[in-house]
Amino acid sequence: MGCSNCGTANGKPSGCKSNGGCSSGGCNRLNVHDWLANLPFSDPESSCRIVEVSFNNGSRKDFYRNVTTQYFEKGDLVSVEGVSGFDVGEVTMQGEMVRLQMKKKGIEEFNPEMKKLLRRASEKDLEMMRQNKDREKEALIRSRAISRQLKLDMKMSEVEIQADGRKATFFYIADDRVDFRELIKVFASEFRLKVEMRQIGARQEAAKVGGIGSCGRELCCSTWLSDFKSVNTTAARYQNLSINQSKLSGQCGRLKCCLNYELDTYLDQLQQFPDNADTIQVTKGTAILVKKDIFKNIMWYVLPDSNKQYPLTIDRVRKIKKLNTQNVIPEELEPVELGAAKPKEEEHGFVDLVGQISLKTLEKADRKKRHGPHHGREGNRPPQKNKRK
């Protein structure tokens, strides 16, 4: 993960001081470690000639075919084919790892429509990219004002201008379908470039903005998570989490993606619990299931007219359920005892270089210092001189 001081500027990180390459990979979002980089291959000629290039600090990635005779490493700035021009990005992966990533994403290696990698980025290319990147903030503010003037129900999230300044991609959020045909005409005449509108969701917006989650780490969507799966409150119920919308929601306003991380473990463990055990019959009435503790294999029940919860083992619940099917009602639940009181630890006094010291010794020393060594002692008073009559 990147730190707050490790901001990328001019293609080089300003905080980590690692000569243009971040050792943690936090300077580039959605970073992937190439664990095949140092492995030798028997046939170097058959190595993959496709490289993965990231744009806009790792928020967008794409694959390009290397038709040059140069060899590019991770972190090199390259110029690639764009829309009627070129764009500048950073090489994030090369070699056999790219082939595996393409297979994972279902992209054919010998696709004739794949764009090409043109050359290593020159100083002129980088200067042109910096000039156009400086226009993005102003273009975003202006685009929001234009969308409000046209009374369109949409929110402009980000503007990404191509390195040569010939094309701009406007990312927006909308709940319903938006007719932005008039908006594109206004944008094209206002900014003098080709306009592409791309709709994104709230999760994608949070990934582009970035931030720190409630766990204290950078957001998963802005660092490594690329596939957004649907999350519902059922995942929270399986994990015995309270349905508190403010605590379960992330910065995007949707349910946190991390609710799905441990869901499979909970579902596997819940298979050991008996089915149809929401209620069991005892002499005192019908006990209702409140919660399940999958780590201790404990099921908690409450009796009618009482708020006390009784922990039962899985075997005990199965036994009671079996008795109920035989029309036998047991007398007691026989809960297990949990959380036995721990013995109180012995308090230790302060220890200095010469031994132990307690508060009583400090109080005695303070009393001597305050009253003096001769206070309260008649025998130690100095002799008084005889006065002449």
Image (spheres, rainbow, N blue to C red):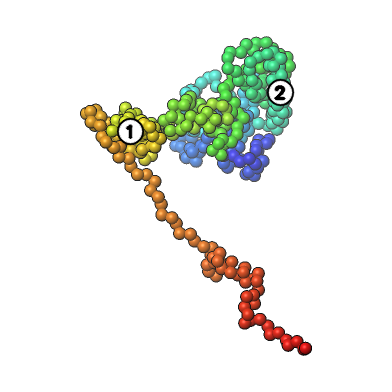
Q: Residues within 10 Å of mark 1 (few under 14, many from 20)?
A: some
Which residue is the extreme one toward the left?
326
Kind of residue at badge 2:
Ile
Circle 2 sits in a helix, a strand or a loop, which is it? helix
**382 lies left or right of 336:** right
Please name whichever residue, 20 or 232, is drawn nearer the observer in this view of the structure: 232
Q: Position of residue 212 (x, y in %)?
A: 58, 36
Which residue: 58% across, 14% down?
176
Q: Position of residue 324 (x, y in %)?
A: 25, 29
**47 lies left or right of 296:** right
**32 lies left or right of 380:** left
Q: Position of residue 354 (x, y in %)?
A: 55, 70
**148 lies left or right of 232:** right
Which residue: 68% across, 13% down?
151
Q: Which mark is residue 273?
A: 1
The residue labelled by disc 2 is 141
In this orientation, does residue 89 appear?
Answer: no
Compared with 386, 205 (above or below) is: above
Please name whichever residue, 16 or 371, is drawn nearer the observer in this view of the structure: 371
In this orientation, does residue 168 appear?
Answer: yes
Please name whichever residue, 301 or 194, is drawn nearer the observer in this view of the structure: 301
- Mark 2 → mark 1, Cα distance in angstroms: 56 Å
Kind of residue at badge 1:
Phe
Q: Position of residue 104 (x, y in %)?
A: 46, 27
Which residue is the extreme one toward the front?
389
> Which quarter of the figure is the N terminus placed in?
top right
